[in-house]
Amino acid sequence: MKSKINAIVMAVLIMGLVLAACAPGATPTPAPEEGAPAQKSERVLRMLTWEGYAPEELVNKFTDATGIKVEVTYIGDNNELIAKMAATNGVGYDLVSPTLNYVSTAQDEFGIYQPIDISKVKTDQFTKAYLDSILEQSKFEGKSYALPFVWGTTAMVVNVEKAPDAGQSYLDLCDPQYEGRVSYRAKYDTLYMFAYALGLDPAEAVKDEESYRQVMNQVRDKLIECKPIVRTYWDSRQQLEELLTSEEVWVATSWDAIAWTLAKDDARFKYVVPKEGAVGWFDTFAISAGAEDVDAAYEWINFVMDPHNAAVIVNNTGYQTASEGSAELASPEIAKLVAESLPPEKMETIKWYFPLPSYATDIQADVEEQIKAAQSK
Amino acid sequence: MPQEIDVSLVHVTKKFGDLVAVDDVSFEVPKGSFFSILGPSGSGKTTVLRMIAGFETPTSGDIYIGGERVNDVPPNKRRCNMVFQRLALFPMMDVLGNVTFGLRRRGGMSKAEMERLARKALERVGLQGLGRRKINQISGGQQQRVALARSLVLDPTVLLLDEPLGSLDLKLRQDMKLELKHLQARMGTTFVYITHDQTIALAMSDTIAVINRGKIEQIASPEELYRRPATHFVASFVGENNKLEGGRLVRMRDAQVCEVDFGGILMSGRMGEPLSPGDTVDLFIRPEMISLRPGRHENGFPGKIEEINFDGSHSLIVVNLLEGRAPITINVKLQHTEQAPEVAAGDLVTLSWRWDAANAFRSPTGKEA
Amino acid sequence: MHLSTRFRRGQRLWLLLLPTLLWIGLLFVLPHIKLFLLSFMDRRSGAFTLANYAAFFNSSLYRNVFVRTTTFSIVTTLLTLFISFPAAFIITKVLGRKMKALALIAIVLPYWVSELIQAFTWMILFRETGVLSYLLQYLGITHHNIEFLYHNSTIVVGLVYTSLLFMTIPIINSLDTLDDSLIEAAYDLGGDFWSTMREIIIPHAAPGIMVGSIMVFMLNLGNYVTVTLLGGKNSLWFTESIYNQFIVRFNQNQGAAFGVILLTFSVLFVWIVLKITKQDLTEAM
C-alpha cells in the first residue's frame, strides 16, 4: 500500500513537472538566426539591458544594416547588472545600460567598465545638455564612463476622484486622511523624495558619510512615523497597477511611464509632480571592461540614438531618450501626456539621481531594512 | 440448575452488500467452557468473532454477553477481550506497558497496583521477569503469551481468540495448544476460539461449532463431532476419512443402519441424516477404525495392498478392494502395536469395520459411481 | 576469483552512488565550504575577521528579524501539523481505495503551480477588493470591504498552505505501516479515541511527524516568495536580509555569515527537537 501511495504521488508530481516544462517559458535571448554566414568571423554584439531597450524591430534593422548579430540579456535591477558584470569582470558582455548613479561607484569598486571614446560617438544626435551632464557625472579618476540613453522620472500618481487634493507634496503620502490608501516603494527613490520634502539635500549630503547618514536617519524616522498610513510597499509595476485600478490605493509614488499608461485609458489617474519636484533617473550606455567588439557597441549607440530609432524605444517603454528630436517623432498621444505632466518649469525642478559612493548604498540599505523591520498596525 | 450462559447469538445474520457472510447463526456458550468455531477460510467464522467483539454490527439478530444484549455496545465497553490473529501487540511499549494498557484505560487503581496485576498475569502465562523487554526482543511464543496476558489481566467474561496459534511453527503450536487448554481450565474464563485447524479444535474444545458458508453445520462435543458428524460437510471437513462416492442405498436394516451398494460390494453404515432406499449416498469411513487381517476371511472385504506409507507410530496402508465392478481404494491406518500384523505390498488382506465407523450422507452431486 | 568479484561488485556500488556524491559534493558541500570561508573574511581586504558575526549579534534589527522568522516558522510548522495529521489519518485509515487516491491527488494538485502563482492566487482571494471580501458582503456578513492581506496571519495561512504536502505525505507513509488491528486491539482493551491516538497512533507516526516537521520548518525558515508577497509592509524575513546583503549591498561576506547563522541554527534546532522527543534521525528519515 505504501508503495502504491508513493506511486500516485510521484505520478502526479511528474505530470506537474511535464506541464510546467511545456508551458511557454521566458527566453530572453533571441536565438541567433541560422543562415549562410557572409564572413568567416561573424560579428556579435552582446548586450545586458532592460526590457524594451533593444526591441526586436531595431535589432533586426541593425543586423540588416551592419551584419552584426545581437544577443540581448535582460536585467531586473542595477544590482543584478553589477553582480553579473562583477562575477566575470565584464567578460561576456560588450554593452550594458546601468543607471547613472551606479556607474562611477561600480567602476570604483569592481572596475567593470572602460572609458568612453567620444571620438567614436555621433555627438550631434544627443541633446547637448544631457550629453554634457552625463559625461561629467559618470567621471571616475578623470575619465567618463557613460553616455546618456533613456531617462524618466518618479513622482506621484493620484486617483483624482478619491483624492483630488493629493499631490501637492510628497508629505501627502503621510497624510492621515489617506490612511491605508497610500503605497510607495521601500527603496531609495522614496528616501530621496522624503529627504527633499523634509527640506534636506541628499545630493549634497552624500559627499560625506556622516552627513548622509544623518539625512537618511531623519528620512527613516519620518517613514517609520508614517508607516501606519501606508497600505503596503509596492514592488512591481503589476502590483502598483492592481492597487490603483482596484482603488485600494489612491495616492502612490510611481514611475512616469506606469502613470502615463494608466492615464491614457482611465481619466481617474493622473501623474502629478509635487512642489519638491520629480526624482529623475538616467539609464546610460557603458562599455564593458571585457568587451570583445568595442566598435560594434559604438555602432549600436550611434544607430539607436538616431531619433527615428530612438522614437521606437520611446513608444515601446513610455520613457524619454537623450536623442534630440525623438520625442517629436514618437506617438503624439504620449508626447501630449509628457508635455502636460512635465512642462518646462517642472523639468527644471527634477532632482536627478546622484552618484552613490559605496557607503551610501549601505546607508540606504540599512535605512530600508530598518523601515521594513519596524512593526506597525 | 440451568447452566449459566456467557455468550449467546440469536438468529444473527451479517450481510456485506449482497454477500451474506453470516446466515442466521444461533448458539450458546456456557460459562467457563472452551468453545471453538471451526470452519474453512471464508466460512464467516471471523465475522462471527468480530461481531461478538463489537467490531462488526449484525444486520439482524441479537448478541448477548453475560446475559446483556450488546448489539449497541461499542467494543471498548464490552466485557470481552480478543487475542488477535497477528497478536497486535503495541511495539511502542514494553511488555509491561502492553499488559497494563487495558488497566490504565479502566483507571481507578494505583500504578503500583496495575503493575502488580500485570506481573501476576505475566507469571500466569510463564513470562515472569520479562516485563521490561521490548516487544521485538521476545520470541514468537513469548509474544503469544503477552497477548494472552494483556487480555486476561482485565478478567474478561469471555476471551475471544482469533486463531492466534496459526503463525507458530508446529512444535510450538503443539505446546501452546496444551498450555492454552490448561490455562483456560485453571482460570475458568470462557474461551471462544476460532480456527480452521480441526486438530486444534478437537484437542482443546469442550464444544465445537462447525461453520460453512455462513451457516452452522453442527454444534457438538469433539468426540460427537468426530464419531457422529451431522452433515456431509462435517464428515468431510473434520478428521481424516475414506470417502467412497456415489453408492446406492439398497435397504435400511433399522432406523440407524443402512446398506449401500458400491459397484456390487455391499457396505453397511450409520445414516448421518434421514435417507431412503434408492438414494445416492457417499460413505465416510475413518481409516483408524478399519481392522485389517492378512489373508482372505469371511465377513469382510478382500483386497490387495497397493502401498505402505510408514509414519512412525503408525502406517498408512493403501488397499484396493478386489470384488467390485469398479476399483475402490481404501486407506487403513495401522497402529504399530504388538498385535499389529506384519504385511507387505502385494499381500492379500481382508478389511472390516463396525457399522458405526462408516457414516452415510446423501451425495451432494447425486451422481452414481 | 572470489575476491575479484567481490571487489568488482563494490566498485559497481560506488558507480551507482557517484551521481549522488557528485550532486551533493558539487552543489551542496563545496558552496557551503565557500560560504563558510567567506563569512570569516573582511569585505575589502579578505583577511580573517569575526566582524560579520559580530554585526549580527550587535544589531537588534537582525536579531529581531531572526527571532521573528524562527518564531513564525515554528508556529507555522505546528499549525501545519495540526491540519495535516487528521487529513493523513483520514486518508490512510478512513477513506476507501478510490477516495484515497482522489484525496491524494487533491493534496498534490496545488503543487503543479509554482509557489509564486500560489501566492498570487492568495492575493486575489484575500485583497480588500478580493474574492473573500466580496463573498462576505454577498452573504451579508459585512457591508464593507475587508482587507485580509498584509497581516501576520496572512503569512501564516500562506506558509501553512505551501507546507501541507511536505507534512502530509511523510505522515501518510508512516500511518500506512500501522496495522489496523493495533487500533482495534486498543479499542478492545478499553481504549477510546484520544487514548488510542495518544498511545498507539501518534507514537507509531512519530517518525513521519518528525520528518514532516523538519522539512516544513526548514522550508518556512528559507521561504522568500510567499512571505514577501503576502506579508506586506511588516514582513521582513531573515532570508530577505540575506538577499539584501548579497544583492543590494554587494556584501557577500556579511550575507555568508547570515547564511551560516541560519544553517547552524536550523541544524541545532532540529537536533534539540530530536533529542527532546527521543527520536533518532536515522529512524526518522
Image (cartoon, rainbow, N blue to C red):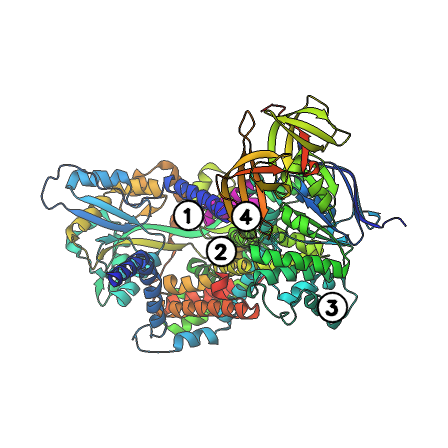
In the foreground, A309 or B153: B153
Among all residues in the image, which is located at the extreme left?
A40
Give the magenta range: C101-128
* Percent of width and height locating residue B347: 50, 39
* Percent of width and height locating residue B12: 76, 38
Circle 1 residue: A256
- Taking the magenta stretch, the answer to whether it contains residue A143 is no
Q: Amino acid at mark 4?
A: Trp
Check the image and report above or below for B367 versus A32: above
Give the CA separation, mark 3 to mark 2: 60 Å
Q: Chain of mark 2?
A: C
Q: Chain of mark 3?
A: B
- What mark, if any, has residue C228 been given in the picture? 2
Q: Chain of mark 1?
A: A
Among all residues in the image, which is located at the extreme right?
B1
Q: Amino acid at mark 2?
A: Thr
- Residue at x 66% of width, y 35% of height: B233
Q: Secondary structure at mark 4?
A: loop
- Residue at x 44% of width, y 38% of height: A264
Q: Quadrant of the C terminus of chain B?
A: top right
Check the image and report above or below for A151 versus B146: above
Among all residues in the image, which is located at the extreme top?
B278
Q: Amino acid at mark 3?
A: Leu
In the foreground, C46 or B55: B55
- What mark, if any, has residue A54 been given in the picture? none
Q: Chain of mark 4?
A: A
Image quadrant in which you'd find residue B16 = top right
Give the CA separation, mark 4 to mark 3: 77 Å
Q: Residues within 10 Å of mark 4 (few under 14, many from 20)?
A: many
Q: Do circles 4 and 3 both sit on a common chain?
A: no
Circle 3 residue: B117
Mark 4 or mark 1: name the one nearer the start of the chain: 4
